[in-house]
Amino acid sequence: MSTQIDSLLHEDRRFPPSEEFAAQAIASAELYERASSDRLAFWAEQSRELLTWSKPFTKTLDWSNPPFATWFDDGELNVAYNCLDRHVEAGNGDRVALHWEGEPGDTRTITYAELTAEVKRAANLFTSLGVEAGDRVAIYLPMIPEAIVSMLAVARIGAVHSVVFGGFSADSLRSRIDDAEAKLVITADGGYRKGKVSALKPAVDAALASRGELPEQTTVDHVLVVRRGENEVEWTTGRDLWWHEAIAEAEPEHDAQPFPAEQPLFILYTSGTTGKPKGILHTSGGYLTQTAFTHKNVFDLHPETDVYWCTADIGWITGHSYVTYGPLANGATQVLYEGTPDAPHPGRWWEIIEKYGVSIFYTAPTAIRSFMKLGRKIPKQFDLSSLRLLGSVGEPINPEAWMWYRKIIGNKVAPIVDTWWQTETGAIMVSALPGVTSTKPGSAQVPIPGIAIDVVDDAGGAVGAGGGGLLVVTEPWPSMLRGIWGDPERFKETYWEKFWDVEGGPFYFAGDGARLDSDRDVWLLGRVDDVMNVSGHRLSTAEIESALVANEMVAESAVVGAADETTGQAVVAFVIIKESHLEQASGLADITGALRSWVGEQIGPIARPREVYLVNELPKTRSGKIMRRLLRDVAEGREVGDTTTLADTTVMQIITDKMVKST
């Protein structure tokens, strides 16, 4: 069957950079020219400019054994030194590294000198607990400064961290500890979420206890516990240590030793719902080069004046690359927030932006659409004039959500960088460059300089402008994953096998559908798994969702394909209506009928939903991704699958009940 994806939605709005923004922009069109003339020389130049190498590299890329690449292989550096010490040595120790805001309102302001001192103590503490270079450390913490300190201290001693999102269950934590054979676990008694303390230490206890009866079956020697929630916890003497007590006794001085560029830096497990989780492995020199480069140029970072805020949790790749490593490598001042966007009130994020004068804001489309649902009144209560650049990450952003973001949050002037990348790519791969690119609502736009992207058909042939196909990376890139931890064959099969023998290959297959417009800008069409086949037409869920959100009544939507005897698959939509329109609606049947007609008008009769269900919430993971496979289960009348990774596990029962009542 052809993988050509029909693209039926068109977007003609364009927003060129203002003269004022372009005049001060970090990025320039020259970056593309330099990268295209000699891609490897370009990356070598960026790495030398952005990072401090203890032993300079002489070899940029070794691709002699694909799909296993090495970058800057004969060079040596220390990742934590690049994020901390060198800024202090350059006289910027007094610059604020972190403005930390707890959900209850408690705060900490931490300078680069203070953060460096804390990381040095933590490095000495971890070493005293027997952690050596190459050992694995599991980190299971809320969004508190100790999470950043832990990651950097692990990197400083050449160990490998595996950060596990604090919302994951004991079973999920156990599988990740087991696979990495972690020696140390760092956790907290609890953290604040929606006004309450969410306990964390009990999940660690359960994860370690469930390993078996024999003590020698566990690789974990110690559990370090940060006191945050003040909730009662059980204690295993000899294994468990309070962070504040142990770090107070640690030596204050620590010299950062250099490690090879290919020293493993972290394992981050993908949150797949079936089978063994995949431990995505990233190393040091190439990863830090691309995260620093993209953070500087995509976000137009001026570290002396900007206040940057990425809302991602450190349990996800966005938190690794654009909360910890990219910003700190560039000497940025950033905001770190512990809680949820709606606690203790729905204007919490905008309040924080006003309080700290945030100038660069990076968040997910699902959060933007949630704010759309509540209306513009809430953000309009706060002074957001400090914002000069907005970013989007996590999934394709609907054009109307993009426009709302620009108009209401960006005051019609802040450029938006809609970024595409993955856990596996390590850093941003496709994005506008502010001050250079004319932005298009809903388009990720162009590969960053030095990155080779294409859209191909099932045989690996280029699709060309206008057509939809499969998004691939055609050349190795610095921050690429180096494999799946302990499973090289799975790495090859999962990401490279499909386009192993194509001309110019092998290509890395991202799993996403995309199309190129007449300017060869990239438009993401969603996961290939989410593409529907309706009467022989392969339709993108992302485009139909965008059409629905373009209706003034709709705040958010999710579309799935359900089995249909006549058309093979039919479009089924789950829609959240803005509160203001729910109050005005004469009847739910009128709304659903109007929305079915609307999609037919916007895209064509082939895309008109068979059913439209009005819901209050959509099933999302804690990282904000909509779990469409669960909605597909409901639409096809099957028992709903595993919901343990949802942020709110009750959502699916509510949706199921509502559908039963409406039939």
Image: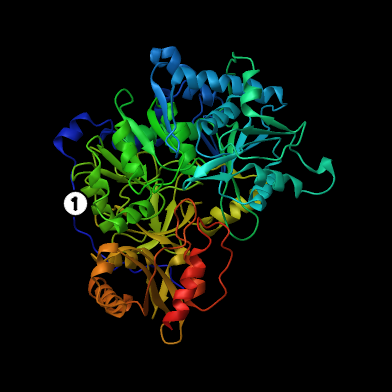
Q: Amino acid type of disc 1?
A: Arg
Q: Depth check: give the residue in front, 5 or 13.
A: 13
Q: Is residue 394 visible?
A: yes
Where's residue 108, x and y in %?
Answer: 44, 27
Q: Depth check: give the residue in front, 337 or 272.
A: 337
Q: Which quadrant holds residue 41?
A: top left
Which residue is at a point 52% across and 26% down the rendered structure image?
79
**Residue 39 located left or right of residue 406:** right
Tell which residue pokes out farthest to the bottom in this image.
566
Q: Secondary structure at mark 1?
A: loop
Which residue is at a point 27% across and 49% down the rendered structure image?
378
Which residue is at a point 53% across and 18% down the rendered structure image?
117
- Label 1 belongs to which residue? 14
The colour style of the image is: rainbow
Q: Is residue 88 above or below residue 13?
A: above
Tell which residue pokes out farthest to the left in this image.
19
Q: Depth check: give the residue in front, 203 or 269.
A: 203
Q: Quadrant of the C terminus?
A: bottom left
Where's residue 81, x and y in %?
Answer: 51, 21
Q: Depth check: give the residue in front, 613 or 650.
A: 650
Q: Is residue 53 visible?
A: no
The number of discs equals 1
Q: Is residue 402 above or below residue 308?
A: below
Where's residue 433, x and y in %?
Answer: 29, 40
Crowding near the residue tagged with mark 1, few <14, some 14–19, many ≥20 C-alpha atoms within 10 Å:
few
Where's residue 53, x and y in %?
Answer: 50, 20
**Residue 332 located left or right of residue 505:** left
Q: Is residue 67 above or below residue 323?
A: below
